[in-house]
Image (cartoon, rainbow, N blue to C red):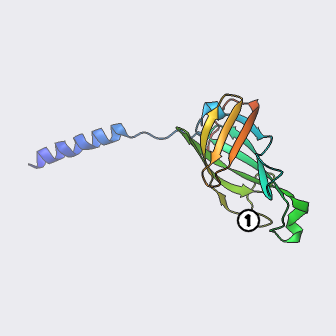
Amino acid sequence: MVKNARIFFFAFLLLASGSCKFNPNLQGKGTESIQGIWEEDNVDYQDELLQYSRHHFRFSCDSVYLTIKTFAKVNTYPDSCFNNGSWTEYAKGTYLSKGDTLMLTTTFTKSNFKQKISGCYRVGQYLPAFIIRKNTGDSLYLESLKQHQNIKLSLKEKTVCIQKPLN
């Protein structure tokens, strides 16, 4: 009985260790079709809106760097932050593209993409999700799942992912 238990135990260990592998110490590859620099040139009905934002995305492997330029006609911030109705916010993090969905896991940063813990505008995580309506190679059409706004991006520069070590 003890002999059978030992054989079973060692067989189990052998099978379990054969199914495990270490993850590579490299960043993920991301989605090849969206690698590059994308810019939103115009926002639908921007002249009629009290506030709108233009987006600039840089997808590099599984990382995303986001610049959001906001234009407002109404001041909802302290006067020292309103900046005559135009300001820029930055975020960086990772993204995941599955099927027709693009999910960002980012954090608001300073303009140099270093951590931002206080200041004007938003601080903390920025977790938008988008439906990819169309990707033609040089145009990317997204619909925000939270704000239900369309974002029409033009490809400004195509890049290729060169994975870097995580350390």
Q: Position of residue 41 (x, y in %)?
A: 80, 40
Question: Badge 1: few (under 14), some or many (20 or more) residues near its Cα, within 10 Å?
Answer: few
Q: Position of residue 58 (x, y in %)?
A: 72, 40
User: Residue 134's image quarter?
Assistant: top right
The residue tagged 1 is 117
Extreme-right residue of the structure: 84
Q: Position of residue 81 (x, y in %)?
A: 86, 66
Local SS, label 1: loop
Between 27 and 87, the one lying in front of the other is 87
Between 4 and 49, the one lying in front of the other is 49
Q: Name the amino acid, label 1.
A: Ile
Residue 106 vs 131, above or below: the answer is: below
Residue shown at 87% from the left, 60% from the top: 85
Residue 59 vs 148, above or below: the answer is: above
Left or right, 141 with reference to 25: right
Extreme-bottom residue of the structure: 78
Left or right, 63 with reference to 50: left
Q: Position of residue 162 (x, y in %)?
A: 66, 32
Q: How many marks?
A: 1
Residue shown at 73% from the left, 47% from the top: 66
Residue shown at 58% from the left, 39% from the top: 28
User: Residue 10's image quarter?
Assistant: top left
Viewer can see residue 23: yes
User: Residue 34's image quarter?
Assistant: top right
Between 161 and 91, the one lying in front of the other is 91
Viewer can see residue 68: no
